[in-house]
Amino acid sequence: MDDNVQPASSPPGDGDLRFQALFEQLPMSAVLYDTDGRPRATNRAFLDLWRIPEGGAAYLLANYNILEDDLLRVHGLMPYVERGMRGEPTEIPVLGYDPDMNPVTSPLEGPTRWVRGYLFPVRDGAGVLRHVVLVHEDITERHLATAALERSERLLAEAQRLGHVGHWEHRLKTGETVLSDELRRMVAWPTGVPSPADVRAVVGDTGYREIATTLAACVRDGQSRDLTITAEIEGRRRHFRAVFRCELADHGQPERVLGIAADETEQEEERLRTERHRTELRRAEQLIALGTVAAGVAHEVNNPNHFIGLTSELMAEVWRDALPALDAWAAAHPDFRLGGMPFAEAREEMSFMAREVKNASERIARIVGELRGFSARARGREDVGTFDVNERVRSALRLLQHRVKMATDRLDVRLDADLPRARGDGARFEQVVINLVSNACEALTRQAQGIAVATGRVGDDGAVILDVLDEGVGIDEAHLARVSEPFFTTKLDSGGTGLGLAIVERILADLGGELSLSRRPEGGTRARVRLANVVIP
């Protein structure tokens, strides 16, 4: 058995009982599982969500095992469950539960529900996995609303496709394109027949190639085609939905291509706004779930860490008091060894270890403080003084010196000496630097690839910037918008939790800053921190 997994049959300790009490008070539906997949307890919110009577809860606890759930296996979700039961924080994708189709959950009543799940490990002070908590997020209303919205959008798109908002005719024999007055108004085209250069100037090279390809396809097979065209018109980016249809002459050969277009700029902008709002809502919900669990974990970690801190101080004091006697003994016995080491070496090591244990305990305490910060529903911006940005960057790089050397032979550091001080907690900003530089190290695949760290000032407001650039694998375009979401990670197999950049964004929000990530054209990633809350001399 893995040394980091506690057998399910172990009797509950005081930490278990405290955690179970906290578990009962969770506001969201949750199930507490032993590591063998059997449920140990459900909370009140779980019974309410699934409308389970007391008898049904007893049946579930006595007969169910999440690792044997055929419904999860059929839907391909069992790998997520197995990963979560091994102690890795895991998000289970959306699944529709139909009580009439799942005999395991036969006590359930009502219509199908759509649920997203999150699996969180619960470890004791020694790091041993004791339980796994499955938190349910009921997204039924959101799912149904989204489905209804998508149906409405399809109907609207079809209506726009059939409506003659603007039309054109492309004559294949002469190559001329004739526009209706309404279409000219929509695209701000002057009078006269537009040339290919005119079209290219409006829609760009990519848009021009797409139009030419669509025209050719219509002529080739006689089938209608849809195309979305984006154009920069009078300083505004506009989106058009176009339909192409080829007409044949009397002899059966293609004669012209007719088209209609609808300006969908407002709809596209609204879609993007809605998507941003959905993303913000999803992140807020994830933060709430994380904060609730983090509060319990922080409480459990803080107690043993407090004991470690006090004990390390006592051990250091005992060692200092014992040194005179040990020194005298070692002087009289040159071969004296302590802990298998020559006394002189052991003397240095013990002093070093005593300091490091104390430092490690203090670092754990700071991490616990960050976890507790997540559990707050809202926290105002803290003004705890000012800090030197460059000094905090240097401090972070000193802490990461070994890790950076293991990752790259090239670290380029360029710090602008003429920077104003920034307002806020410097230690928290240092944590941002540590996180970003660590991510840069992880992105590198060869020792010859480099990392650059630079500070400077931009903008009329004199904002301070920090750039961390790497020559690594880069971030996939599809992931750029999600990398700072809590629990989103592409490194689950290597231990990633998906919390690093979420914590960075939370810290920067408190400092009045912001983070932007982008792919570098030459390869790799640029992470830019912008601090506008600075002290202008």
Image (cartoon, rainbow, N blue to C red):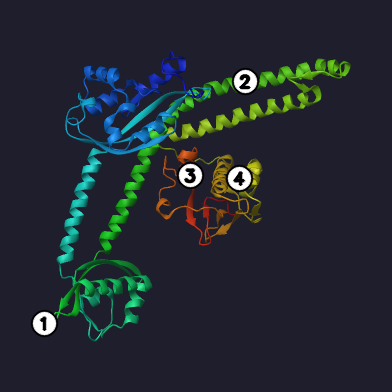
Report the side of 514 relative to 334 (left or right): left
Q: Which residue is drawn at 22% across and 35% down?
A: 113
Q: Is residue 292 visible?
A: no
Query: Counting residues from the N terminus, which is met first, the one under dot 2 or under dot 4?
Result: 2
Query: Counting residues from the N terminus, which is met first, the one under dot 2 or under dot 1?
Result: 1
Query: Counting residues from the N terminus, which is met first, the one under dot 1 or under dot 3?
Result: 1
At mark 1, the secondary structure is loop
Under mark 4, the amino acid is Phe
Q: Name the residue under label 2.
A: 310
Specify few, some or many for label 4: CA neighbours under 10 Å numbering under 14, 14-19, or 20 or more.
some
Query: Counting residues from the N terminus, which is met first, the one under dot 3 or under dot 4?
Result: 4
The Cα–Cα distance between marks 2 and 1, rounded to whole angstroms, is 96 Å
The Cα–Cα distance between marks 3 and 4, rounded to whole angstroms, is 22 Å
Under mark 1, the amino acid is Asp
Which is in the foreground here, disc 2 or disc 4?
2
Under mark 3, the amino acid is Leu
Query: Counting residues from the N terminus, which is met first, the one under dot 2 or under dot 3?
Result: 2
Q: Mark 3 points at which residue?
A: 501
Which is in the foreground here, disc 2 or disc 1?
1
The Cα–Cα distance between marks 2 and 4, rounded to whole angstroms, is 30 Å
The Cα–Cα distance between marks 1 and 3, rounded to whole angstroms, is 65 Å
Which is in the foreground here, disc 1 or disc 4?
1
Report the side of 411 relative to 533 (left or right): right
The Cα–Cα distance between marks 1 and 4, rounded to whole angstroms, is 81 Å
At mark 2, the secondary structure is helix
Q: Name the residue under label 1.
A: 250
Q: Which residue is drawn at 40% across and 29% down?
A: 85
In the rendered image, residue 179, in percent from the top left (x then y), is placed at 22, 79
